[in-house]
Image (spheres, helix red, strand yellow):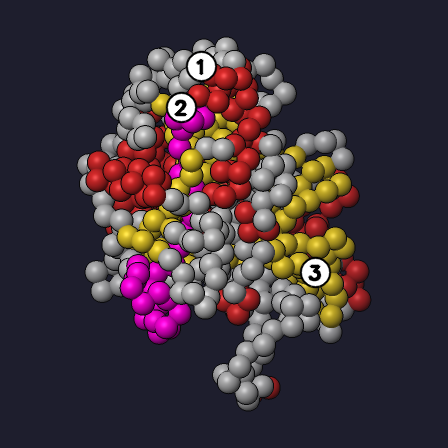
Amino acid sequence: MADSTDHSPAGPDLTAGDPFSADSLTADLGRFVQAAPSSYHAAAEVAQRLVHAGFTMLGEHQQWPPEPGRYVVVRDGAVIAWVLPEAATPTTGLRILGAHTDSPGFKLKPRPTVLSHGWVQAGVEIYGGPLLNSWLDRELCLAGRVVTRDGATHLVSTGPMARIPQLAIHLDRQVNDRLTLDKQAHTAPVLGLAGSSEAAENADVLAALARTADITAADIDGYDIVFADTAPPARFGMEEEFFASGRLDNLSSVHAGLTALERLAAAEAGDSDPVIPVLAAFDHEELGSATRSGAAGPFLEEVLDRLYEGLGATRAERAQAFASSWHLSADAGHAVHPNYPQRHDPANRPALNAGPLLKINANQRYSTDAPGAAMWASTCRAAGVPTQEFVSQNEIPCGSTIGPITATRLGIRTVDVGIPLLSMHSAREMCGVEDVGALHRAVTTFFTAAPHH
């Protein structure tokens, strides 16, 4: 796979005083988000950083080594990494941190160049459930993967190239009463001008994208391209206690799993632990996960099949291992919005910087149950971090996560958690700095603590 960007992997500064402090981790989260404008970039960045930390990159087409070690494998926009300890047996249980790499937004359509009234625009399709108005008047890049006629896959990311301009208030005096966006007519970004016949003839969105990978538009046989906000992440607040960025749902959870594995590698820990730590970051959660790289697909199950086959496990021994395993489904949740307090449960009031959420739903839209709540409470106590419950207001049903999907596919006990956000599914979400550090510490403890039964 070729990458049109040339950068060394980011990661915690191990020469710093405390590379895993909340401040250091938040700065690193910002770098990670900037390196991951698409799910494909996110998966590649996780793999690159883990290889830098001493993990071995595997290919699905290869024979995998059965010996203990640290491994990572990428499938499209998904990535799975694990530590197989020296003490692992056919019945050793798993500690899986599940997350997702994709975020709601816009995806480039086929025949993407649209000429309209002297403008060059891009044809886009809405991906998932974004807050559409939050994407207006932002400088956007195009990012993702292209496959060329020689069969090579290239990761591509442009600089600021596109913008969805809002209509001026002078032309819509009622816009502040209620903004309604037609998903077809009002969301096409502008990329350039086509005022002359020559400019119109040369207008080509794919050609502009291809230049970033040093290829031509004619070379491209297929593409998966999304749009991303190019504004850099930022800390803010009276005490700089808040953090704003795109794609915190759910790169915040991917980052927590990644940095937990990096921390284990830096400390040379995990090799003799009684569990197998696994980071499973899937694609397409925002669409329902029903793809080959989504949580409803076979990726995780196939990796675990190969892992336990290498340990010589029988079917019964694998069932024993799964029975002693846990899956922590980490996805962002909602903090109480001060301008809309009635939209939240009156008794459970999650706040920023009060700890990661334990997400609970009576209809099993989240997988948490009593044993799972107890495991999470034990983990947070051991990690020295606070936690808080999230449950929906009864008139406002919650969404769901990969938790129930993975629990159904594998039968592994699952708990739903995540850091609280405001502005979820906005082009730019916000969280608390302390929560970034708290989730990292909880996940690190989850990866290393003895199994909780």
Q: Residue at the location (65% across, 46% down)?
A: 224
Which numbered dot is residue 370? none
Disc nearest the viewer among 1 and 3: 1
Give the residue number, with chain letter if any, for mark 3.
123
Q: Residue at the location (37% across, 57% down)?
A: 391
Q: Give the secondary structure at mark 3.
A: strand
The residue carrying pointer 2 sits among few (fewer than 14), some (14 to 19) or many (20 or more) residues within 10 Å by Cα, namely many
The residue carrying pointer 3 sits among few (fewer than 14), some (14 to 19) or many (20 or more) residues within 10 Å by Cα, namely many
Which image quarter is the C terminus in?
top left
Quadrant of the image occupied by residue 452: top left
Q: Position of residue 287 (x, y in %)?
A: 59, 51
Position above or below: 125 against 329: below
Q: Look at label 2 and name its amino acid.
A: Gly
Q: Look at label 1 and name its amino acid.
A: Pro
Q: Residue at the location (35% across, 40% down)?
A: 372
Q: How far apart are marks 3 and 2 (CA)?
A: 47 Å
Give the residue number, with chain letter if any, for mark 2.
93
Q: Give the secondary structure at mark 1.
A: loop
Describe residue 252's horizontal placement relative to residue 148 as left or right.
left
Instruction: In this rendered view, identify the residue nearer to me: 87 or 26.
Output: 87
Q: Distance between the residues labelled 1 and 2?
A: 9 Å
Quadrant of the image occupied by residue 382: top left
Position above or below: 162 against 212: below
Q: Give the secondary structure at mark 2.
A: strand
Magenta-drawn segment: 321-350
Give the residue number, with chain letter if any, for mark 1.
90
Describe residue 325's horizontal placement relative to residue 235 as left or right.
right
Decide which of tag 3 and tag 2 comes sooner along the chain. 2
Position above or below: 169 against 38: below
Q: Where is residue 128 in the image (x, y as percent from the top left)?
A: 58, 56
